[in-house]
Amino acid sequence: MSDSMNTRNFIALDGVDPQTTVNSAAIYSQQMLYASAQITGGTSTPNGTLKIYGSNEHGINSPGLGTPTITYWAELGSLSATAVGQGLAITDVSYKWLKLIWTNSSSTAGTMDVRMTIKGW
């Protein structure tokens, strides 16, 4: 990868309860090519499914200036996770918006963090 690519690395799910279903906020991803998500920490042992979704809905005119209202999402990838450190990646993102959804199976009590990296132009 070239150093000239735009790279954003951030916590998409911060200290969430892995014993519930959790949705991240919509993440503006227009002109991004790659996306990855990884369970990076917390105090629980995760056991569930992490999915990445994409949407091409309009949302809002100026990302970062308000919360977009997005109704329709397409599943892009999923991972059955049983440990911190597991993750998934997708290439050719091609969607204006991304989001993560964590669905619990039998996680232990505590918290969980999921970090994302998206790269593009």
Image (tube, helix red, strand yellow):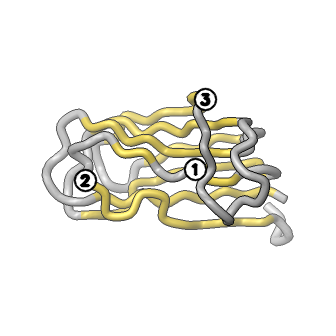
Q: Which residue of the protein is positioned furthest toward the left in this rendering?
A: 109
Q: Position of residue 39 (x, y in %)?
A: 39, 55
Instruction: Check disc 2 and report the residue beneath it.
Output: 17
Q: Quadrant of the C terminus?
A: bottom right
Q: For numbered disc 3, what is the local secondary structure?
A: loop
Q: Residues within 10 Å of mark 3 (few under 14, many from 20)?
A: few
| In this view, the mark in front (3 or 2) | 3
Displayed quadrant of residue 89: top right
Residue furthest toward the bottom?
Answer: 3
Q: Amino acid at mark 2?
A: Asp
Q: Which residue is mark 3?
A: 72
Identify the mark nearer the N-term, 1 or 2: 2
User: For this view, does 84 lie left or right of residue 76?
Assistant: left
* Residue depicted at 49% across the width and 58% down the height: 12
Question: Which residue is labeled 1 in the image?
Answer: 26
54 or 118: which is nearer to us? 54
| Residue 113 location (% of width, % of height) | 36, 60
Asked if one can make out residue 92 in the rendered structure from this viewpoint, the answer is no
Disc 1, SS: loop
Would you call the spot at circle 2 few (<14 residues within 10 Å), some (14-19), or many (20 or more)? many
| First reached walking from the N terminus: tag 3 or tag 2 | 2
Marks 3 and 1, the one that precedes in the sequence: 1
Using residue 121 as the reference point, say whether residue 63 is left or right of it.
Answer: left
Say what amino acid the circle numbered 1 marks: Ala
User: Which of the pair 97/37 is nearer the observer?
Assistant: 97
Q: Residue at x 59, y 66 (%)?
A: 9
Tell me which amino acid carries mark 3. Tyr
In 3D space, how far apart are the residues under numbered discs 1 and 2 (Cα atoms)?
Answer: 19 Å
Q: Position of residue 99 (x, y in %)?
A: 55, 45
Q: Alpha carbon of mark 3 to alpha carbon of mark 1: how far?
A: 12 Å
